[in-house]
Image (cartoon, rainbow, N blue to C red):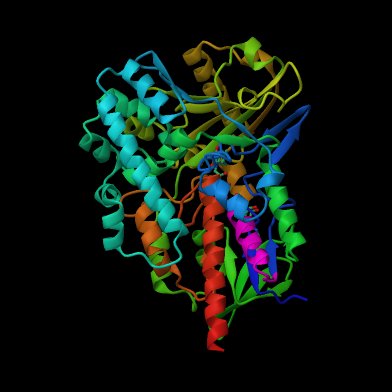
Amino acid sequence: MKKYDAIVIGAGNGGLVAALRLANNGKKVLVLDKNIAPGGFSTSFMRGRFEFDASMNSLHEFGTKDNPGIVYKLFEDLNIIDKIKFVEIKDAYHVYSRNSKSDYIMPFGVESYIDKMEKYVPGSKNSLEIFFKISRECYEAITYLETNEEEISDEILAELYPNFIKFAILTLSKGLQLLRMPLKAQEILTANWSYFGSPSNTLSFVHFACMFYSYIAKGAQIPRKTSYEISLILAEAIEKKGGKVQYLSTVKEILFENNQVSGVKLVNGEEYYANYIICDISPHVVYGKMIPEKILPQDAIKLTNSRVLGSRGFSIYLGLNQSAEEIGLNDFNYFIYHTLNSNKEYENMNSIKNNNCTAVVVNNANPTCSPKGTCVMQLMTLFTGDCFDSAVSVENYFDLKEEIAENIINSFERTTGILIREYIEEIVIATPITFARYCGYPDGVIHGYKATGPDNLIPRIRNSVNENYIKGLRFCGSFGMYLSGCGSAYLSGNRAALDVLKEMEHEGENE
Ligand SMILES: Cc1cc2nc3c(=O)[nH]c(=O)nc-3n(C[C@H](O)[C@H](O)[C@H](O)COP(=O)(O)OP(=O)(O)OC[C@H]3O[C@@H](n4cnc5c(N)ncnc54)[C@H](O)[C@@H]3O)c2cc1C
């Protein structure tokens, strides 16, 4: 009863998709999660009369039936697309710079985006057109890499997607400079850098370009009933196909037999057996705590130690007792910065006094997400260093989190002129400690490993086969090869499962 074809540790987005892919291919799969429900960060919670999505403010790479993105096609392939209802977000973002007292509202749709930018920054049109052309090529190259089963040489890539290869080594700042984009247009364009947790001088051009192209060209969606609905649908589909999703099951150790993966041991001592294990949790935890030292390959330790943990998350969930319209919250997605220079802002965010934030007003995409005459809002900031860890103590935790939340709410009100405080009926504050506890992320980071220098999207994808240090052991999710984000986590789960299926087939042929 306890022997499976594969075990997945963690029922986050990546783990659930990996398990469903395996189950759909007739494999006996067990998913183990320490929490009481599926989804990891893709979950929701209730306070009073409000339901809050814990994380998914927008799902990128999705699109629509007529203009499907990679994640849409994946959900179609997994036979779950018809079960989930999505709503579209109307405008891409509204960004404010406090220092220059300026703000910009940017729309979806490539042409509309370029036209709006030309209004804000006359003379930017040509560079924007080239940017979107190259971004599209990068997006197509990544899709090709993702969907092609065969090994693809760099020569073939260079022939098919020359700009992709040309820009692959550049940072976002360098790439935009090369396109001679006016500085102000660069700054407005890169406003959503904080969603990547990496500023323009370290984020790779190609990574940003792919995500941004799909965001602007295909729009962004949110599930009508929160991301938890997707998690439940995935878990249910796994069980329908004969798989098992088991909660309250914290994995403590990965078991080995003759240096081969053979199963897992839970904290309560129970053991489950399989020759393939997919981890939807961080290599820091797996290599650092779950594998006997004598089995650990030195290269795996070196690589993991060389990676930089991403930014720590701090989130404020508000249930407001007036409608968004009455309060004057007209946009879905706000970015509040001191300046539009992402590199400076990234530095500023290594302080708990930083009051930059992103804010999402869910009702502006999904009017029925809260009772009539109310609305739901999420404000979020990042700490880009260890400022929170060094300021927090057992004694000051509650005071500190309230102080930070107060500071962020003030900053939102002062910058936008929209008063929200007097309408707060429910407030929940999640700190890096909340995120570390809920999903087991080291230091409460929410972006997995930072995308930086040689450890950016393209090198990660190209080197991923060299990172399978232990036979039968794979990774997916935020710490996986596609980096963080819901869409990336779903895709990485699928990739990990396809690799395992290939390996199983290969093993079957050799027996
Ligand atoms: C506040 C916030 C806002 C966000 N907003 C967005 C957004 O708008 N758009 C977007 O695309 N992304 C967003 N993200 C990021 C996105 O939510 C994550 O990248 C994605 O959900 C991660 O999926 P994952 O597969 O890595 O699984 P995770 O969500 O990391 O789940 C891992 C699972 O593993 C389990 N686990 C951990 N340790 C063990 C163990 N020892 N044994 C058993 N189980 C274990 C945990 O309980 C958890 O269920 C946001 C994240 C946060 C926190």
Nearer to me, 463 or 213:
213
Give the prevailing secondary structure in the magenta stretch.
helix
Q: Residue at x 50, y 28 (%)?
A: 358
> Where on the picture, by quarter, is residue 201?
top left
**Seen in the image, is 343 located left or right of residue 417?**
left
User: How far across and how far down the image is residue 238, in percent?
Assistant: 71, 60
Looking at the image, the residue that sits furthest to the bottom is: 511
- The residue range painted magenta reads 13-28
Nearer to me, 48 or 178:
178
**Seen in the image, is 197 located left or right of residue 36?**
left
**Seen in the image, is 430 located left or right of residue 354?**
right
Work out whether residue 57 can be spotted. no
| The magenta stretch spans residue 74 | no
- When the figure is inspected, residue 147 is found, relative to residue 293, above or below; the finding is above
- When the figure is inspected, residue 301 is found, relative to residue 491, above or below; the finding is below
- When the figure is inspected, residue 255 is found, relative to residue 480, above or below; the finding is below
Work out whether residue 241 can be spotted. yes
**Seen in the image, is 175 located left or right of residue 18?**
left
Q: Quadrant of the N terminus?
A: bottom right
Looking at the image, the residue that sits furthest to the front is: 66
User: How far across and how far down the image is residue 315, in percent?
Assistant: 58, 33
Nearer to me, 102 or 139:
139
> Where on the picture, by quarter, is residue 19?
bottom right
